[in-house]
Image (cartoon, grey):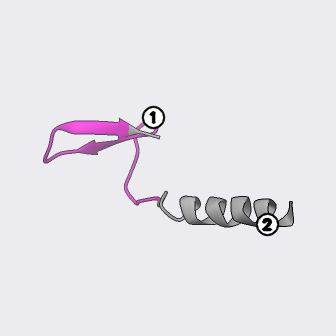
Amino acid sequence: MKKVILAVLIGGLLASSFSMAHGGRTDKDGCHRDTKAGTRHCH
């Protein structure tokens, strides 16, 4: 059981390292505008 808990914790740490934040200003809706592509994405 301890091995399962350890595996879940390590997996969670590894998965969380892939979700990295990026800088940039946001509008009132919390969205970023990509002026080159003409798109926007929200958080």
Measured in 3D between alpha carbons, the distance from the residue under mark 2 to the one under mark 1, in whole angstroms, is 45 Å
* Residue lying farthest to the right in this orientation: 1
Name above or below for residue 29 compared with residue 14: above
Placement of the N terminus among the 4 image quadrants = bottom right
Badge number at residue 3: 2
Left or right of 16, for residue 32: left
Which picture quadrant has residue 3? bottom right
Which residue is depicted at the point 40% across and 60% down? Answer: 23
Circle 1 SS class:
loop
Which residue is depicted at the point 57% across and 60% down? Answer: 16
Name above or below for residue 34 compared with residue 6: above
Badge number at residue 28: 1
Q: Earlier in the sequence, mark 2 or mark 1?
A: 2
* Residue lying farthest to the top in this orientation: 29
Circle 2 SS class:
helix
Pinpoint residue 8: horizontal percent, then vertical percent. 71, 58
Left or right of 33, for residue 16: right
Pinpoint residue 30: horizontal percent, then vertical percent. 46, 39
Q: Which residues are magenta?
A: 21-41
Badge number at residue 37: none
**In the foreground, 20 or 11:** 11
The amino acid at mark 2 is: Lys
Which residue is depicted at the point 29% across and 37% down? Answer: 40
**Main secondary structure of the magenta stretch:** loop
* Residue lying farthest to the left in this orientation: 36
State yes or no: residue 17 in magenta.
Answer: no
Mark 1, Cα crowd under 10 Å, few <14 / some 14-19 / many 20+, is few
Which residue is depicted at the point 47% across and 40% down? Answer: 43
**In the foreground, 21 or 3:** 3
Mark 2, Cα crowd under 10 Å, few <14 / some 14-19 / many 20+, is few
State yes or no: residue 36 in magenta.
Answer: yes
The mark lying in front, picked from 2 and 1, is 2
